[in-house]
Amino acid sequence: MTQSRLHFLFVNIGHFLDHFFMLIFATVAALTLAREWGLSYGELIPYATPGFIAFGLFALPAGWLADKWSRRGMMAAFFIGIGVSSVLTALAQTPLQMGTALFAVGMFAAIYHPVGIPLVIEGRAKTGMPIAINGVYGNLGVASAALITGFMIDTAGWRAAFIWPGIICVGIGLAYLWLISRMPKPANAAAQAKKKKPGQSYRGVPIIRIFAIILATTALGGIIFQSTTFALPKIFDERLGGLALSATMVGWYAFLVFALAALAQLVVGYLLDRHSARLVFIGVAALQATFFALMPGLNDWAALIVAFAFMLAVFGQIPINDVLLGRLTTSEWRSRAFACRYIVTFSALAASIPMIAWVHANWGFDRLFMGLAVAALFILLAVIMLPRAMPAVTQGAAAE
């Protein structure tokens, strides 16, 4: 394996770990911690909010450091920092201590997206499939969080679910440092960007309007993504009573849904490299709205099948915004542009946590699904306002 391919593999593993660590607590809270600490699910999950606030808040400084200093150096800090923070989380004895430790996890997790995604598309003309492959790794991290955490709860306790992944992640970080020490330094992004300046409009549509649409759909998509990925273990715990009889079984069902649904990103990535991003986006948003509207009242097999269908659409949206943003930005500013995109995303994620607790406590998950269907319809309306054709290659690749 060449150094560039090995580096791409490390970056993809980083995406897996980023989402994995951010969702360990979701399964721990749903399946054991609420009972152990004598709190309801709705009372406990707001303590995850500081972590998701940090997930968004620290994206911009991480992107700025990556553009000004080193994307590879920031990636190494991500691996080691999030691993150490996870180990420290296992020491929590109270909900307040847990919230503080999760804030540290979120702070280091914030590094990945404004750093890792630009590393994925760096120097590439066609970005749909690389971003899709990277997205599959991320969603497998989402899936594995429920599976591995459920297994660890049943066999070694919830603290082990934080400790062992943390130790492994630190080891991966040390291996990554070894790799980048032997790779040639990347070309200066600022020098490349000066060869081609971005325009002020595309197809007569101001760039600022396109960015506004990307950010609006990012915010709504973040709410949808967080609501589904964070709550799915609890949804399955409540609705698959005839199919899932243990924490491990709930984890397996969540893993299968997340893992199989992640393949939708490969299909979307293939389509984005060959067809209009606007048309692909419209189809994905319409599918989200349809399947969320079908979910209320379903149980067992019907709930499992429809959950799989809406997760296909939820995961299918992820590479679209990244591809659009990558095509509209030069390499010099790309980490900061992605940082702004992910500040919006993760601010929406943080807001989703108390929303899930409030909706579940007052009305249950049926009302949540109806709200998500409405959010998907707003995404659809926003996407319709995009230009009928979007840039086919990244500006950084065009400049090179």
Image (tube, grey):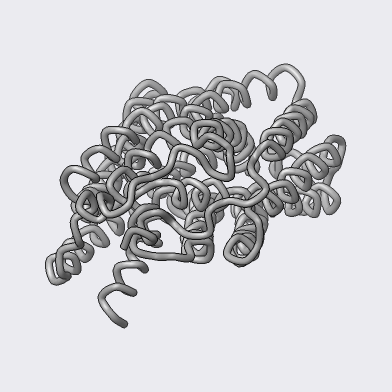
x and y, in percent, of residue 122 in the image: 34, 60
x and y, in percent, of residue 83 in the image: 28, 48
Location of residue 372 (image quadrant): top right
Q: Residue 323 vs residue 94: left or right?
A: right
Q: Can residue 95 be seen here?
A: yes
Quadrant including the C terminus: bottom left
Q: Residue 42 vs residue 97: left or right?
A: right
- Looking at the picture, tell me which residue is in the foreground, 91 or 288: 288
Q: Residue 69 vs residue 154: left or right?
A: left
- Looking at the picture, tell me which residue is in the foreground, 153 or 24: 24
Which residue is painted at 77% across and 42% down in the image? 239
The answer to whether 370 is drawn above or below residue 117 in the figure is above
x and y, in percent, of residue 293 in the image: 83, 37
Q: Can residue 120 be seen here?
A: no
x and y, in percent, of residue 386 in the image: 64, 40
Which residue is painted at 65% across and 47% down in the image? 314
